[in-house]
Image: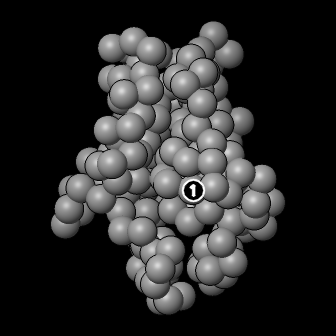
Amino acid sequence: MSTPVDSTFRVEFVCTGNICRSPMAEVVFRRFAESVGLGDRVQSRSAGTGDWHVGERADPRTVAALERRGYDGSLHRARQFDPADFAVNDLIVALDSTHARVLRQLAPTEADAAKVHLLTAFDPEATGPDVSDPYYAGPEMFDDVLGMIERACRSLFRQLEPALRTTTRHASSPDADPIGDP
């Protein structure tokens, strides 16, 4: 994964309609970067494989689940993944196997297809390849899905963090773990 000339690492999270899972991942990953002073080095965004919800806010249950954990998802507006997104992102993270398959088919080159990874692949404790879709479930499922996303995003961020850091150390205590377990 190469970082663009401006040294901003760009990651895009993709689910079906961009109103449940991928907005959660976008917000969580951004928070992890900001919590260790690397918010200016990371751009986190999201999209859906379909166009059903383009322009809509995140599902109210998504926003509520995020709020219960201290995140703000209120500004999100759904968008559809565009193959041109490959050119501007270092990493494309699919929330389930179907999304990964669709994204790889959309990739203009093999190098672009290699940017596609499943979110759960970064979580050594994941019990399967997919982050469950909570759309047809109740609010408690949104909380469970957010927990899965937090664990996987935390692991992904920890893998990327050394490369994102500059020679200047962050001013926080080396013992502090701002992206520790919830």
Q: Residues within 10 Å of mark 1 (few under 14, many from 20)?
A: many
Tell me residue 162's x, y (percent).
Answer: 43, 33
Find residue 59 and report its image quarter.
Answer: bottom right
Which residue lies under the disc numbered 1?
17
User: Is residue 36 visible in the rendered structure shown here?
Assistant: no
Tell me residue 146's x, y (percent).
Answer: 48, 71
For the N terminus, give its image quadrant: top left
> Tag count in the figure?
1
The residue at the point 20 percent across, 62 percent down is 128
Q: Nearer the viewer, residue 142 or 125?
A: 142
The residue at the point 50 percent across, 89 percent down is 138
Find residue 12 and report its image quarter.
Answer: top right
The residue at the point 43 percent across, 63 percent down is 149
Tell me residue 107's x, y (percent).
Answer: 43, 22
Find residue 111 and report its image quarter.
Answer: top left
Q: Nearer the viewer, residue 148 or 6?
A: 148
Tell me residue 99's x, y (percent).
Answer: 39, 46
Image check: 182 left or right of 84?
Answer: left
User: Is residue 134 visible in the rendered structure shown here?
Assistant: yes
The residue at the point 69 percent across, 78 percent down is 60
Image check: 32 left or right of 147?
Answer: right
Say what amino acid the circle numbered 1 marks. Gly
Asked which secondary structure carries label 1, the reply is loop
